Image (cartoon, rainbow, N blue to C red):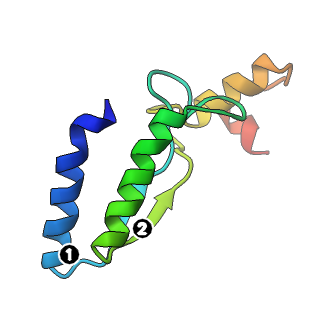
């Protein structure tokens, strides 16, 4: 799926670089669900990581530094809710997602 977006990624970094942008933030997370980076605790989708590798490579080629967001606090793309579910699946007694932080 990520291969469809190669041109978009390259074009975006080309435009950003030409506009003087040299720092960008991008997601480096997707936990559980369809085409996720982390499919379960400690298990990763190599094909999805290749997409992230491409983004990192393109940023470097265009002189753009990346700030990688490694976790998501919201439910979209896994987030804290997914980590809580994985903890519950392993026998942890958590009443809500806030309990995961304590």
Q: Indicate the position of residue 53 as horizontal and vertical percent values.
A: 45, 52
Q: In the figure, residue 50 lies in which quadrant?
A: top left
Q: CA distance from mark 1 to mark 2?
A: 13 Å
Q: Nearer the viewer, residue 73 or 21?
A: 21
- Location of residue 83 with respect to 14 vertically, above or below: above
Q: In this orientation, does residue 96 appear?
A: no
- Image-based side of 56 in relation to 87, left or right: left
Quadrant including the C terminus: top right
- Location of residue 67 with respect to 100 vertically, above or below: below
- Image-based side of 77 in relation to 17, left or right: right
Q: Residue at x 47, y 34 (%)?
A: 47
Residue under numbered circle 2: 66
Residue under numbered circle 1: 17
Q: In this orientation, does residue 91 appear?
A: yes
Q: Nearer the viewer, residue 95 or 20?
A: 20
Q: Residue at x 22, y 35 (%)?
A: 4
Q: Residue at x 27, y 73 (%)?
A: 62
Q: Residue at x 71, y 31 (%)?
A: 41
């Amino acid at each position: 799926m990520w291969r469809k977006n190669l041109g978009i990624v390259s074009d975006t970094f080309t435009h950003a670089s030409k506009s003087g942008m040299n720092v960008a933030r991008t997601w480096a997370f997707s936990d559980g669900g369809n085409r996720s980076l982390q499919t379960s605790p400690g298990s990763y989708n190599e094909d999805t990581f290749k997409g992230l590798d491409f983004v990192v490579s393109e940023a470097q080629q265009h002189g753009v530094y990346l700030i990688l967001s490694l976790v998501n606090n919201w439910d979209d793309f896994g987030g804290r809710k997914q980590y809580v579910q994985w903890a519950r699946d392993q026998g942890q007694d958590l009443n809500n997602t806030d309990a995961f932080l304590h």
